Amino acid sequence: MNEPQELSDATCRSLLTSGIVGRVGVCTASGPGIFTVNYAVVDDAIVFRTSPDGVLGTHANGSRIAFQVDHVDYEYHRGWGVLATGRSQVLTRSDDLEHVRAVWDPRPWVGGSRELYVLLAWDELSGRQLGGGWNPRSRLPVCRTAAAAVPRSDAFPDWPDGRIATGAYDV
């Protein structure tokens, strides 16, 4: 049986910065909610865009939220997950917004206006890996680089262009 292994802070950050899609957990008056978003890591913070009138836009500012990314290899029964938690804030200053856009502007895949930028400067970052003897980054279907999100054709060799199918959406 596979035993989970704690990931180092450096590995957690590396996995977090290589991704494009993650999940935000937020508490509301009606209970907790988890929402899939496109995101970017800028400096030591996670940034995502949302609608000012949506659940995240109305509940995330100034709240403690959670952000999670993961990858599962169903064939070999292994995977990893990274969790970041901290207090969020809405970015409004033009120089902050310009900096985010210059580093990596998270572009929502879903239609509609998503002009509210929310920043999570994590105060806790942790992760676990299931299954040893492999490099979690080597099996990522998409790996974000400084220039762009690059499809990983070696992750899905049956797909000649390395595309992945996903049901991810941005709230």
Image (tube, helix red, strand yellow):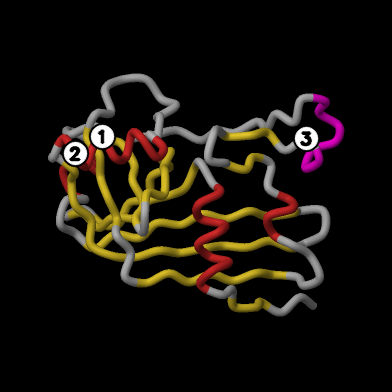
In this rendering, is residue 41 above or below 127? above
The part of the chain drawn in magenta is 154-160
Alpha-carbon neighbours of circle 3 within 10 Å: few (<14), some, or many (≥20)? some
Q: Could you say which is closer to the camera, residue 129 or residue 12?
A: 12
For disc 2, the neighbor class at 10 Å (few under 14, some 14 to 19, many from 20) is few
Residues packed near mark 1 inside 10 Å, few (<14), some (14 to 19) or many (20 plus): few
Q: Are marks 1 and 3 in contact (CB under 8 Å)?
A: no
Write down the residue under mark 2.
Answer: 95
Q: Residue at x 34, y 65 (%)?
A: 85
Q: Quadrant of the C terminus?
A: top left
Using the image, determine if residue 122 lies above or below residue 47: below
Circle 1 residue:
98
Relative to 127, is 139 on the left or the right? right
- The residue lying toward the viewer, choosing from 86 and 35, is 86
Of the image marks 3 and 2, the number of the one nearer the N terminus: 2
Q: Nearer the viewer, mark 1 or mark 3?
A: 1
Q: Per the image, is 159 magenta?
A: yes
Residue at screen point 51% across, 54% down: 69
Give the CA separation, mark 1 to mark 3: 32 Å
Q: Residue type at mark 2?
A: Asp
- Say whether residue 155 is left or right of residue 21: right
In contact (CB < 8 Å): disc 1 and disc 2 = yes
Q: Which residue is label 3 attached to?
A: 153
Q: Position of residue 71 (x, y in %)?
A: 63, 53
Q: Mark 1 vs mark 3: which is more N-terminal?
A: 1
- The local secondary structure at tag 3 comes to loop
Q: Residue 160: image x %, image y %?
A: 82, 25
| In-front residue for pair 132/103 | 103
Distance between mark 3 and mark 2 Cα atoms: 37 Å
Task: Give the residue drawn at x 65%, y 78%.
Answer: 5
